[in-house]
Structure formats: structure tokens, C-alpha cells
Image (cartoon, rainbow, N blue to C red):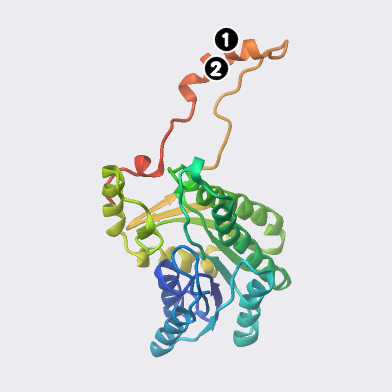
Amino acid sequence: MAILTDRVVAITGAGRGIGRELALLCAKEGACVVVNDFGVTAAGEGSDAGPAHDVVAEIERAGGRAWANLASVTDPHGAASIVEDAVQRFGRIDAVVNNAGFLRDGIWHKMSFENWRAVIDVHLNGAFNVSKAATPYFKAQGSGSFIHFTSTSGLIGNVGQANYSAAKMAIVGLSQSIALDMQRFGVRSNCIAPFAWSRMIATINGDDPAEQARLRRMQSMSADKIAPLVAFLASDRSKEITNQIFAVRKNELFLFSKPKPVRSIHRSGGWSAQSIADEFIPAIRSDLAPMLTSPELFNWDPV
């Protein structure tokens, strides 16, 4: 039996790229799928109903069941309509995948408030809005899975993406709080950092030779590689998996650690600014986090 038989999954940003592959595989695994896509450009502009309807048509041609939702996740009422469509069309909601997003990159000293707010709104507030709408149903039925898309740009860091990095790291905090608050109701919440070529990644400036090499590696990582982990986390087979951060890089799966204390130094008389400089910093210097970007850490070819 398919792993998502009789399950209902709502996926945001499912009209193109990674979201499309998630919708197609979840449907293939037996789920009824709400395909949400506002149809914006990679920079978050305009709207187009075509992508969502195209994915629904593709699922239905393959014998699956799906419904197109065109709402913006940044609007709480629109986000609620995604969940309501699942319940009204298919009778329930079992998993929410917060995938919708776009990039408006810029080096920190040139980043505008408008671009900051727009990226925070779609990634972080969008994840909040859709998750909040699904929560009463998950709580009442005693089950449910939240799957949030984070990024190594937030987990590790990247140049020129302060808005995106902040939103994606905040999503980890959101997921953790949901997991802790909802565990008593049998509801789980996890994050995935995807490595995959998409139209959003294609907007990244590749003038620097190192960045060009990174983009060439990204082009070898197809979006369909992300989908199996999402299908697993949406299924009952993952019922004991919650409050975790995963990554997918072609055929590689990763489990990320969370921040923990690295060193602790006690001074019975308390600390002064001078003693911190003279004693604490020299003692912990070898344990200070290095200045790494995501491409520098994941510097091997995907396998």
C-alpha cells in the first residue's frame, strides 16, 4: 500500500519547482493534495493561476486527486482557505507543507526595508498563517504533521541573504515551539533544508567564480530528490519523529544538530569586561564558531 493512502496533504508554493515535485509524489503515494500557488515570479511579483491548475491536471491524469488553491499565504484568510479546501474537498487534513517563498537578495548595507519585509512575510508569516489554520483540526483529531522548509542559508549562513536567512532560521524556532506545544496532542513538526535547482536558486548572482561553481553543483541536484522525505514525514510512519531538522542534497540525507553549550567557565567572584577579555575569550577561542557560508561547508560534489 502507498505510504499516504487516505491521507490529505496541503502544499504551499506547489505550482513549480520543489513544490510541484512534492505534490506529484505525495499524490503518487496515495494522498489527496491541495496544490496551493499564488503564481508569483521568483521575486514575488504578479500572480498566475496556471501553475497550480497545471499540477492538479497532471495529478488527475495519473489517476490521483487534487485541488488548486490560489491564495497568498501572507494573507491569514487566504492561508485559512488552503486548509478549508482540504477539509471541504477531501474530508480532513493530515499534513501541511510550508514550502512557498521567493528571494530578494541584497548585500546587507544595501537591503531595503521593503525587501526585508516581503521575504519575512512570505516565508515566516506564511508558515505561521497556514500552520495556525491547520492546528485546530490537528488538535481535534489527535494527529498531524507540519513540514516546514528552512535553508542552510539560515542554519549556517550565506552572503547577501539577510532577509532570507533570518526568515529561514526563524522557521526553525517556530517549528520547535510547535513541536513542543503540540506533542501532547500527537502532532509533530519538523524542518527540511533542501538542496535543489529551482527558479528561485536561478536568481542568485553567479558573478563570483566560487558562486558559479556552487551554482553548477546545484544544477545537478533535481527537485524530485526532496519529495521522498516529505512523503515520509507526512505519513504515519514518522509518528515518532518531531522537533528535528533534516536536509536533502541529491542522494544524501542529513540530520542537523541544534545549538548546545560548547564551553562553560565559572568565576566565583563574577565577571568584569576586563576579565572576560583576559580570561574567558582566550579560554574559549579555539571553540569559537568559524566564519563559514553554506557553500563553504557543503563544498563537495553532490552524490
Which residue is at a point 57% across and 70% down the rendered structure image?
95
x then y, percent, for residue 218 = 31, 55
Which residue is at a point 63% across and 76% down the rendered structure image?
83
x then y, percent, for residue 104 = 48, 55
Q: CA distance from mark 2 to mark 1?
A: 7 Å
Residue 196 is at least partly visible in this image: no
Which residue is at a point 62% across and 82% down the rendered structure image?
85
* Disc 2 residue type (three-letter): Ile
Of 83 and 227, nearer the camera is: 83
Residue 91 is at least partly visible in this image: yes
x then y, percent, for residue 146 = 59, 64
How busy is the neighbourhood of tag 1: few (under 14 within 10 Å), some, or many (20 plus)?
A: few
Of 210 and 186, nearer the camera is: 210
Secondary structure, mark 1, is helix
* Disc 1 residue type (three-letter): Asp
Q: Is residue 88 left or right of residue 165?
A: right
Q: Is residue 184 left or right of residue 14?
A: right
Secondary structure, mark 2, is helix
Question: Where is 50 relative to 297, above or below?
Answer: below
Question: Where is 158 relative to 115, above or below?
Answer: above
Question: Where is 198 relative to 31, above or below?
Answer: above
Which disc, if any, is residue 281? 2
Which residue is at a point 53% across and 56% down the rendered structure image?
191
The quadrant of the picture occupied by the N terminus is bottom left
x then y, percent, for residue 161 = 47, 48
Q: Quadrant of residue 224?
A: bottom left
Which disc, if any, is residue 298? none
Mark 2–mark 1 CB contact (< 8 Å): yes
Q: Which residue is labeled 1 in the image?
A: 278
